[in-house]
Amino acid sequence: LSVELEEGPLSRVTTSRGTRSSSKGTKASARNKKRKSEPEVSSFAVVIDDDDDTPIRQTRRATAKKPKVSHSSSTEEVAGVIAGLVGESKTPSRRGRSRVAASPVPSGDESSQRRRSTPRKSGKKSVVQILLTGIEVDHTLKAQVKKIGAEIVEGTPEGFDVLVASSAKRTIKFLYALSMGAEIVTLDWVTESAKVQEILPYADFQINDRYIERKFQFKLSEAVQKVRNNKRGFLDGYAFYCCEGCIPNKRDLELLIKSSGGDYLKAKPRTVRDNCIIIANNDDFKERKFLENLGYDVFYQEELILHGILKQDLLFKKYQFSH
């Protein structure tokens, strides 16, 4: 908790005293000034920082009535007044499963509103955050993004608004955006928005990749709708342990599992757990042997998660591991 006080009477408490004079009139005037000089409590700003990857800074103002402070009062008494006001300004933070924020641009469908664990900073205008996959960032693209008042974000952040993709190829970013229920559009959305210098509706630029949809037997629009209708995620209630030889790597699988509502086990299980799914492949012979000795007799391929995100379903029979 950090408290920033605006400059004002509270930052320094002083008591003005009249100067003695040989004349009685001057002494009386000084006594009158002494009675009237009482420190005033001015408004102050309380800045509350939540310890999180994305800090939340909220500026709140509180005013207090002028307390009666005698000239003999110490600064500790005034500090007590401040402490009480700061205590009243604290609000508990909320945490939940990672979700993307509701888009600042209405798409015409209430179900397209997305969830996000990291709220926008209050007091500032929301900036549309764009995640890219399969697209090279050049000066032209940067200029177009700047024209519409948006920004490009790197990595796989919790708080982004839209994924701009070259196709529906199963990149980690694409699967992550889909598991979050994010808007997924083509590069034309940026280009056309830049022409009119405003953000156009996402619905007019949805990805339509029939080749990928036929290959993996899914419908992107249906998958997105399923994610948005299922607040908990299709992996809710399951725990996953991924062996070392998994492809993609364990870090990427952890990201996809958590964003789909599942629990990720970083440590190798030491006992048999209910609803615990082991992801493995041919290179994980030693780990599989160890887990088999514990009592795990069924293992699954990585596609259980990767294809599962596209279908929003767990295809156990199809992706059970063959010894």
Image (cartoon, helix red, strand yellow):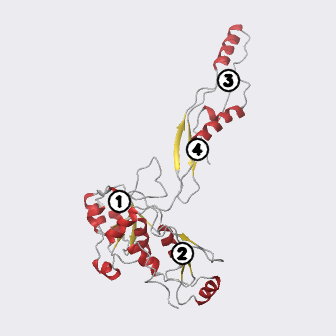
Q: Against 73, is 177 above or below?
A: below
Disc sitting over residue 248 in the figure: none
Write down the residue under mark 4.
Answer: 90
Q: Against 99, is 85 above or below?
A: above
Write down the residue under mark 2.
Answer: 251
> Which amino acid lies under the numbered mark 2 shown in the image of this protein?
Arg
> Which amino acid lies under the numbered mark 3 shown in the image of this protein?
Ser
Q: CA distance from mark 1 to mark 3?
A: 63 Å
Secondary element under disc 2, as helix, strand or loop, is helix
Q: Earlier in the sequence, mark 3 or mark 4?
A: 3
- Name the residue: 39% across, 77% down: 170
Disc sitting over residue 16 in the figure: 3
List x then y, in percent, for residue 124. 44, 49
Disc sitting over residue 112 in the figure: 1
Residue 127: name its quadrant: bottom left
Q: CA distance from mark 3 to mark 4?
A: 35 Å
Label 4 CA crowd tier, 10 Å (few <14, some 14–19, many 20+): few
Label 2 CA crowd tier, 10 Å (few <14, some 14–19, many 20+): few
List x then y, in percent, for residue 290. 64, 85
- Name the residue: 55% across, 51% down: 93
